[in-house]
Image (spheres, rainbow, N blue to C red):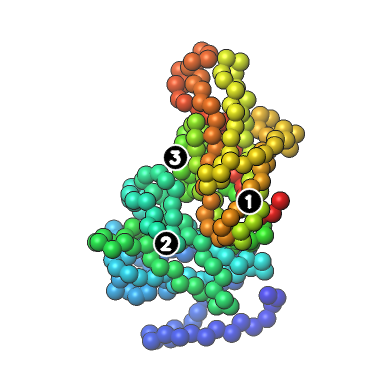
Amino acid sequence: SGPGPIRLVLESDAPVPDRLAVTPLAPSKPLVVDLRPQGDPPHFAVPRPESAWALGPERSTLHPTGPASLHLPFPWSSTATAALVIAELEPGFRLPAPPSGSLWTWPARKPVTAMLALLPDPAGEDHATLPAPFADGEARGPGIRRLTLQPLDPAGPWGVDIGVDGDERFLGPGFHGAERHLDRTPFRWTAARAEVLAPQPGPAGALTVRLVVADDRPFRAPDAHLEVRVDGQVVEGRSDADAAPDPFRIWTGRILAETATGFRTVEIRSRPWTPAAVGPSRDDRELGVMLRRVEIRPGP
């Protein structure tokens, strides 16, 4: 909204403060919520009820100790009707497969660095409630350090750059470490099979998948035979070598998504090769293709 007065309504059983600091939030930018920053109270009244949460080491994380919920500010924008929630976890925490029916999910790799959820439009409210990640029989759930809420436009694309900080939140098995091509362009080598977890907030229907990928091989290496699948279904696509800087190209494919809002598993398959087997190299890794970016969007 434009300049003008802002009316605040404060509902609390605690004493009302003499002064409040108000910071406008850009509607298209991610909203970052530190649950328990050291030495300070939470920026937002996130945990409800308090009795179902326990502080972690050095008061830097919160652990659910029973059924609880997160009361999250919804990052409004002019087009967003959903939000991607990224819960950053304490290092080294290990989780089993996501339980059936849970709003939370995570890439199939261990240890898990972050959990993901899709937060629907809270129907005109400025906050939404998300169940805390907790399973029956556990003493406590994973320690959450920080929450990031990213507004999502169901009609717009969602993408992740591969090889940059934070990409591991969406990466499943089959990826090598981050590298830079010619010390500039970040990417990761895949193995013969690699998986990316991608949120799709839109309805069922046509879905476009777009990769920035390089699959050229040395002379003695086998052809890549790139194959892309979404939730196990093969996606037919085409390449445009002129739309990306060498050696990368743009691969675009289309598929019919039979279910609505949810997370899609984008699987990249290729014939593996080993640099040490085809030339003077000590690199004995099993490599697939160089992956720079994965993007999905509704529509043809």
In this view, 174 is above or below 300:
above
Query: What residue does disc 2 label?
Result: 101
Task: Name the amino acid, label 2.
Answer: Gly
Query: What residue does disc 3 label?
Result: 173
**Residue 40 position within the rendered picture, expressed as x and y whole percent measured from the top left:** 38, 68
| Secondary structure at numbered mark 2 | loop
Which of the 4 image quarters holds residue 88? bottom left
Q: Earlier in the sequence, mark 3 or mark 2?
A: 2
Task: Name the amino acid, label 3.
Answer: Pro
Q: Earlier in the sequence, mark 1 or mark 3?
A: 3
CA gap between label 2 and label 1 equals 23 Å
Residue sitting at x 60%, y 28%: 225
The tag on residue 256 is 1
Task: Name the amino acid, label 1.
Answer: Leu
| Secondary structure at numbered mark 3 | loop
Residue sitting at x 34%, y 51%: 95
Q: Is residue 92 visible?
A: yes
Q: Is residue 44 visible?
A: no
CA gap between label 1 and label 3 equals 25 Å
Residue sitting at x 72%, y 32%: 241
Q: Nearer the viewer, residue 31 or 37?
A: 31
**Residue 52 position within the rendered picture, expressed as x and y whole percent measured from the top left:** 30, 71
**Residue 104 position within the rendered picture, expressed as x and y whole percent measured from the top left:** 43, 59
